[in-house]
Amino acid sequence: MAKESFKTIAQNKKAYHEYFVTESFETGIELTGTEVKSVRAGRVNLKDSWCSIDNGEIFVKGMHISPYEQGNIFNKDPLRVRRLLMHKSEIMRLLGKVKQDGYALVPISLYFKGSRVKLQLGLCKGKKLYDKRDDMAKRDAKRDIERAMKNREKY
């Protein structure tokens, strides 16, 4: 069996700042040929993207894929709505969580798995302002501790 290679294209770091990610799912994404070429060049932005479920299908909105330079007439709108590929039962389970528990579906990262483009989708719950401050304080404290340990090793 050949080992699958993973190559990360884009990450949504803002998602970890804004939300608690409780669960993540791997989904396929429906792209055109010129979009795939643009993705291979790394011209993707997930920053303000989100997902919604309509008529039993899941869509990603707000994901920006820049037009491919050599694409001419085959280029699509950079912000068009793109369909995600998941099993119907998974989509229905996510729909129940989003409707009842107040979760949000947020794209976390876009990557190649072999030759296919995959999107990591996070089931997220929003953070309050004090949660964000607490996370920043923990991160700063950890950084200070590591810096102190590094300086201590020098002497």
Image (spheres, grey):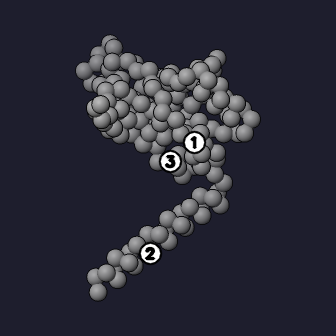
Query: Mark 3 touching mark 1, by CB under 8 A?
Result: no
What is the crowding at mark 1: few (fewer than 14 residues within 10 Å), some, or many (at least 20)? few
Which residue is at 29% across, 18% downward?
A: 71
Query: Mark 2 touching mark 1, by CB under 8 A?
Result: no
Give the amino acid at mark 2: Ile
Of residues 110 and 86, the one drawn nearer to the viewer in this rendering:
86
Can I make out residue 40 in this image?
no
In the depicted structure, whether residue 82 falls above or below residue 147: above
Give the amino acid at mark 1: Glu
Disc on res. 14: 3
Disc on res. 149: none
Position of residue 23 measured from the top left corner of the image (x, y, whole percent): 57, 42
Q: Residue furthest top?
A: 73
* Local secondary structure at mark 1: strand
Left or right, residue 146 beside residue 60? left
* Local secondary structure at mark 3: helix
Of residues 115 and 64, the one drawn nearer to the viewer in this rendering:
115
Which quarter shows the N terminus? top left
Give the amino acid at mark 3: Lys
Give whichever of discs 2 and 1 has the lower sequence position: 1
Position of residue 36 measured from the top left corner of the image (x, y, whole percent): 33, 24
Identify the residue position indicated by label 1 in the image.
Answer: 23
What is the crowding at mark 3: few (fewer than 14 residues within 10 Å), some, or many (at least 20)? few
CA gap between label 2 and label 1 equals 30 Å
Position of residue 21 measured from the top left corner of the image (x, y, whole percent): 57, 46
Disc on res. 145: 2
Can I make out residue 123 in this image?
yes
Position of residue 60 measured from the top left corner of the image (x, y, whole percent): 52, 28
